[in-house]
């Protein structure tokens, strides 16, 4: 069962534990369940051959993600608890799982805050550009309109809109746009009389 199927895949994996009035349910009980989930979420084109080890890895990752989601959202619901209690262990599971793929970033925890810890830069430009491209895919396909163009006079930059009222890429561009708007409102029109010298 796919709960909230439009959510990002990590959330969808977290949601393979779901609840209704009959209690808490586990959607990943067999390797076939995982194969079906991987296909339904677009991670594979055809149902893959999934082993018991793969199922164990998915459930461990899911439990780690749920533990970290609880930390991030300050979720204290007893039914939402993950079997992984230790935040450091959860971070280790996520990083260990990500290391099997092309991901170059890792997750770190400082106090009760989760943060991205980029790995050391690579000497290979192809790998570096591949990382940028992967990040761009995420940014460009985000469901919220977080990427904006700066429409200040003369600016050609883009920015990630991190506040609902943000309109420009920088304070300087904001000042320039406000000054241009003020000038347009207060400049003399060609129809207005001019004083003689």
Image (spheres, helix red, strand yellow):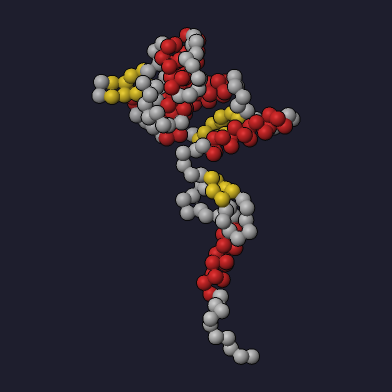
13 up-or-down from 33: above or below: below
Residue extending furthest left? 21
Looking at the image, can residue 118 be seen?
Answer: no
Residue extending furthest top? 52
Q: Residue at x 70, y 30 (%)?
A: 126
Classify residue 95 by image quadrant. Answer: top right
Q: Residue at x 47, y 27 (%)?
A: 10
13 up-or-down from 166: above or below: above
80 up-or-down from 155: above or below: above
Looking at the image, can residue 41 be seen?
Answer: yes
Quarter holding the N terminus is: top left
Q: At which x and y percent is residue 166?
A: 51, 53
Total number of numbered discs in the rendering? 0
Q: Residue at x 62, y 34 (%)?
A: 133
90 up-or-down from 134: above or below: above
Quarter holding the C terminus is: bottom right
The answer to whether 122 appears left or right of 149 in the picture is: right
Q: Residue at x 53, y 81 (%)?
A: 191
Q: At which x and y percent is residue 35?
A: 45, 15
The answer to whether 139 appears left or right of 66 in the picture is: right
The answer to whether 79 appears left or right of 160 in the picture is: left
Residue extending furthest right? 123
The answer to whether 89 appears left or right of 118 in the picture is: left
Question: In the image shown, does 56 or 114 lie closer to the viewer?
Answer: 56
Q: At which x and y percent is residue 149?
A: 56, 50
Question: In the image shown, does 99 or 128 lie closer to the viewer?
Answer: 128
Q: At which x and y percent is residue 55?
A: 46, 13
Residue extending furthest front? 191
């Amino acid at each position: 069962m796919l709960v909230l199927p439009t959510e990002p895949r990590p959330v969808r994996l977290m949601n393979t534990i779901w609840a209704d009035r009959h209690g808490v349910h586990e959607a990943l009980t067999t390797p076939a369940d995982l194969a079906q989930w991987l296909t339904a979420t677009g991670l594979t084109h055809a149902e893959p051959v999934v082993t018991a080890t793969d199922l164990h890895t998915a459930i461990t990752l899911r439990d780690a993600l749920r533990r970290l989601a609880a930390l991030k959202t300050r979720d204290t619901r007893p039914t939402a608890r993950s079997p992984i209690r230790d935040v450091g262990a959860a971070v280790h599971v996520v990083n260990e799982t990500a290391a099997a793929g092309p991901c170059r970033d890792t997750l770190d925890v400082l106090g009760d805050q989760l943060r991205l810890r980029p790995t050391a830069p690579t000497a290979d430009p192809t790998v570096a550009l591949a990382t940028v491209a992967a990040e761009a895919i995420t940014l460009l396909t985000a469901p919220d309109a977080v990427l904006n163009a700066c429409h200040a006079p003369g600016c050609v930059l883009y920015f990630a809109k991190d506040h609902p009222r943000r309109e420009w890429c920088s304070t300087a561009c904001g000042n320039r746009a406000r000054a241009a708007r003020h000038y347009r409102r207060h400049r003399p029109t060609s129809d207005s009389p001019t004083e003689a010298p």
